[in-house]
Structure formats: C-alpha cells, structure tokens
Image (spheres, grey):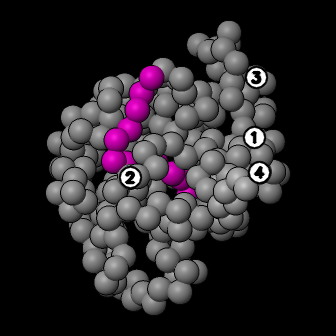
C-alpha cells in the first residue's frame, strides 16, 4: 500500500497561503494593484495573490518579515523579490552564505536559499504597508504550522517590531509563558526565550525608509546574520 500522506506539510501550507481569501481588504488591494500596475512594470503579469513562504525545508534559521510589497513580492510572487528591501536583504544573505545569489528579480530566477526560510506576518500586500492587527492574527495560522513543520530551526530573526511581536504572540498561542518586559525590541539583540526554543534576534526591517536614512546599514544587517549563523550551526 502507498504510504499515508502527512497530516500537514510545507507544500500544503504553501497551497493554503496562495488560496487564502480570509482578509477581503487585503485581497481587494492586491488584486487592484495587480490590475492597475506601476508604469515601470506595465508589461508584466503581476502575481496578485497571497505570497507563500520560501527557502530551505531543512533551515536552521527562520526569517519573519512584515508583508509583501505591493510592487515587489505582490508582483513577482516571491518573498522580498523585486524591490529595494529584497535587494538589500539578499545581498547580505549571499555574503553570509544563506543565498546562492546576491540579488533576486523574479520567483523563477534561480535563486536558492540554504539553511534559511523566509516567512511573513501577513502574506498579502497591505495598503500603506500596514496590515491590521486582526489581519495579522488571521495569518498567524500559517506561521504556527511552519513552526511545527520546520523542526531544525535554531534561530529566528524578526525583521521589524511587528514581526517581533507577532512571533512572540505565536509562541504565547502555542502555550509558551513569556514575560514581554524581558524581551525588548533592540536591533541585533539575541533573546533566549526558553529551553528548547530557538534563539530570537530582533532586527530593524530592511525597508527603504530604514536603509536610506542610515538607521539600518549593510554592516548592521550583516552582523545579525553572521550571529545567526554562529548560533544555528
């Protein structure tokens, strides 16, 4: 007899994300952006759907981001692909040995990740890059399933305060007792949550606002992933 399929898998999570319609505001926004398009991309076919997570199923490092960019991942169909935030992030991931290439332009461009998995707090591009708390709570089901399935994770890197808070909220929903006052969001800080749980590194988000103002520099981001590599391997 053929082997019984697993009750859950990363492929099923991916399918669930892409097919999700639970947040009407976000779905309407993504579809409208994909229809109208930005002038520079007017000849491209936008993805326009929830963007699935991406990476190495045997990852030891998990990146939790905010949400797809309207003309970035919502256009290309892959996390942090096709915008300046992604350019900044993938360059650092390449330099620290997690990415096969220093840049990414499209979901099928050959970029591969090794030892790392990228997910988001919300898988749909939100208006003004601001998902509501309810939308984040709705999308949390996917992060919960990923944490169950990615059994080799040793380090979580939270890109931005929203991702940091969402990851901690997910742990609390999974029964982990946390004293949030002991877990401040500070760039580059390594948090020990509890025995048996991955270390958590809080990191500024590589948004254009942060990188263009110097709040987050390339050496600052590189140091985070160098620390993650040392802790995870």
The residue that disc 1 covers is 29
Reading the chain from its start, which is encountered first: label 2 or label 4? 4
Q: Nearer the viewer, mark 2 or mark 3?
A: 2
Distance from Cα at disc 1 to Cα at disc 3:
11 Å
Distance from Cα at disc 2 to Cα at disc 3:
37 Å
Q: Look at the numbered disc 4 and give the secondary structure of its residue.
A: loop
Q: Look at the numbered disc 3 and give the secondary structure of its residue.
A: helix
- The percent coordinates of residue 174 (x first, y second) are 55, 80
Q: Quadrant of the C terminus?
A: bottom left
- The percent coordinates of residue 204 (x first, y second) are 34, 53
Give the crowd class for mark 3: few <14, some 14-19, many >=20 residues within 10 Å.
Answer: few
The residue that disc 2 covers is 59
Reading the chain from its start, which is encountered first: label 2 or label 3? 3
Please state which of residues 118 and 122 is positioned toward the viewer in this rendering. Answer: 118
Q: Is residue 222 magenta?
A: no
Give the crowd class for mark 4: few <14, some 14-19, many >=20 residues within 10 Å.
Answer: some
Q: Nearer the viewer, mark 2 or mark 4?
A: 2
Distance from Cα at disc 2 to Cα at disc 4:
25 Å
Q: Nearer the viewer, mark 3 or mark 4?
A: 4
The residue that disc 4 covers is 20
Q: Label 3 near label 2: C-beta < 8 Å?
A: no
**Is 37 left or right of 208, judged from the image as shown?**
right
Q: Which residues are magenta?
A: 110-123
**Is 4 left or right of 221, judged from the image as shown?**
right
Residue 101 image-quadrant placement:
top left
The residue that disc 3 covers is 36
Q: Height in image: 96 above or below 144?
A: above
Can see residue 92? no
């Amino acid at each position: 007899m053929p082997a019984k399929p697993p009750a859950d898998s990363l492929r099923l999570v991916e399918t669930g994300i892409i097919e999700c319609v639970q947040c009407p505001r976000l779905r309407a926004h993504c579809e409208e952006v994909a229809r109208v398009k930005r002038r520079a991309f007017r000849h491209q076919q936008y993805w326009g759907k929830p963007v699935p997570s991406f990476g190495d199923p045997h990852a030891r490092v998990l990146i939790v981001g905010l949400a797809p960019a309207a003309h970035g991942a919502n256009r290309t169909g892959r996390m942090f692909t096709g915008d300046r935030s992604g350019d900044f992030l993938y360059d650092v991931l390449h330099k620290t040995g997690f990415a096969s290439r220093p840049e990414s332009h499209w979901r099928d461009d050959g970029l591969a990740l090794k030892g790392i998995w990228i997910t988001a707090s919300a898988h749909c591009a939100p208006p003004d890059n601001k998902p509501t708390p309810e939308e984040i709570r709705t999308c949390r089901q996917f992060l919960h399933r990923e944490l169950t399935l990615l059994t080799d994770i040793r380090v979580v890197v939270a890109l931005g305060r929203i991702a940091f808070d969402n990851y901690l909220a997910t742990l609390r929903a999974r029964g982990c007792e946390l004293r949030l006052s002991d877990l401040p969001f500070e760039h580059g800080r390594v948090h020990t949550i509890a025995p048996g749980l991955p270390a958590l590194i809080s990191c500024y988000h590589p948004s254009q606002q942060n990188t263009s103002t110097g709040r987050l520099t390339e050496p600052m981001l590189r140091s985070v992933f160098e620390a993650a590599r040392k802790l995870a391997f």
